[in-house]
Image (cartoon, grey):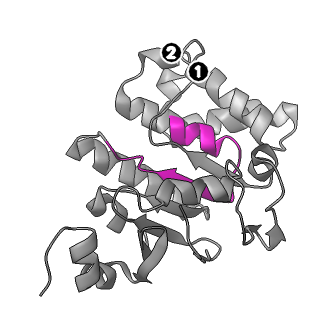
């Protein structure tokens, strides 16, 4: 549930979203992407009101998303997964899709896996593919939903490097994450949700040092 929540995202910004389980983080993403319809309020993308537009239209307008649990087309190759995303999720012409998907494979470190069936990938490779499928749609805004979950420390570092590189290309990012150190390595602003409401927002380290955040999110009792 989301309750009277207002958020803005500047072009090229990386925004982090934290909150305990049930805080409304995934619901927020579902409202932004069009998977859920709001009972009130509006959603804008690049200044355009997209509240009444379906999810696939928002995707073609530049809104990409990765999911917490990757669900690639297991019976397709890595390249075919990207090509499906580029075909149905972007406005690129047919002749340009192939080259764009190759570029995404290079960017995500999956070029050597291009002809491997997605079902055979490791967890880190599936996370990379999840990112790649979102990038294949040529997003202006990329929503990341707990993409570092389940990875080892070294795998998290590799993923953070990839997300930082994506952000450096000018893509705006909103990242929900429980692996806080990964989040803090990328974002420049942090929002903490609790029971669907905004608890606090501001510079990441300032937010993490706030007593309310330590009590609600970190479980540290503050006198």
One can see residue 109 in this view: no
| As drawn, 37 above or below 216 | above
Tell me where residue 36 appears, x and y as whole percent. Answer: 67, 51
Q: Is residue 15 visible?
A: yes
Q: Of label 1 and label 2, which has the lower sequence position? A: 1
- Which of the pair 177/39 is nearer the observer? 39
Q: Which residue is under mark 2?
A: 116
Residue 92's label in the rendered image is none
Q: Is residue 40 magenta?
A: no
Which residue does the image show at 64% across and 32% down from the upper left? 102
Task: Give how far apart the Cα atoms at labels 1 and 2 are.
Answer: 12 Å
Disc 1 is placed on an element classified as: loop
Q: Of helix, strand and loop, which one carries label 2?
A: loop
Crowd rating for badge 1 (residues with CA inside 10 Å; few <14, some 14–19, many 20+): some
Q: Is residue 95 shown left or right of residue 105?
A: right
Q: On the picture, is 221 further left or further right than 27?
A: left
Q: Does residue 194 appear left or right of residue 211 in this picture?
A: right
Residue 133 highlighted magenta (yes or no):
yes
Residue 119 vs 178, above or below: the answer is above
Splitting the image into 4 quarters, where does residue 103 fall? top right
Q: Nearer the viewer, residue 154 or 208?
A: 208
Give the residue at x 28% y 40%. 151
Q: Which residues are magenta?
A: 130-149
Residues marked 1 and 2 touching at CB (< 8 Å): no
Q: Which mark is residue 73?
A: 1
User: Residue 130: percent from the left, percent from the top?
Assistant: 52, 37
Q: Quadrant of residue 79?
A: top right
Q: Residue at position x 22%, y 76% from top? A: 214
Looking at the rendered image, the quarter that the C terminus falls into is bottom left
């Amino acid at each position: 549930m989301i309750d009277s929540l207002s958020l803005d995202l500047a072009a090229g910004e990386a925004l982090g979203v934290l909150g305990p389980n049930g805080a409304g983080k995934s619901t927020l993403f579902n409202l932004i992407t069009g998977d859920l319809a709001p009972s009130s309020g509006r959603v804008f993308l690049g200044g355009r009101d997209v509240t009444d537009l379906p999810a696939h239209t928002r995707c073609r307008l530049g809104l990409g998303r990765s999911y917490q649990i990757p669900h690639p087309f297991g019976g397709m190759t890595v390249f075919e997964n990207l090509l499906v995303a580029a075909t149905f999720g972007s406005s690129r012409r047919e002749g340009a899709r192939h080259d764009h998907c190759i570029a995404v494979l290079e960017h995500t470190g999956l070029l050597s896996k291009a002809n491997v069936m997605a079902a055979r990938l490791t967890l880190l490779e599936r996370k990379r593919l999840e990112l790649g499928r979102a990038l294949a749609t040529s997003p202006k805004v990329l929503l990341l939903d707990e993409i570092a979950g389940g990875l080892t420390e070294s795998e998290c570092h590799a993923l953070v490097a990839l997300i930082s590189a994506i952000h450096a290309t000018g893509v705006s990012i909103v990242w929900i994450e429980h692996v806080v150190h990964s989040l803090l390595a990328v974002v420049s602003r942090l929002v903490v949700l609790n029971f669907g409401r905004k608890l606090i927002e501001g510079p990441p380290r300032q937010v993490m040092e706030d007593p309310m955040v330590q009590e609600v999110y970190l479980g540290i009792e503050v006198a």
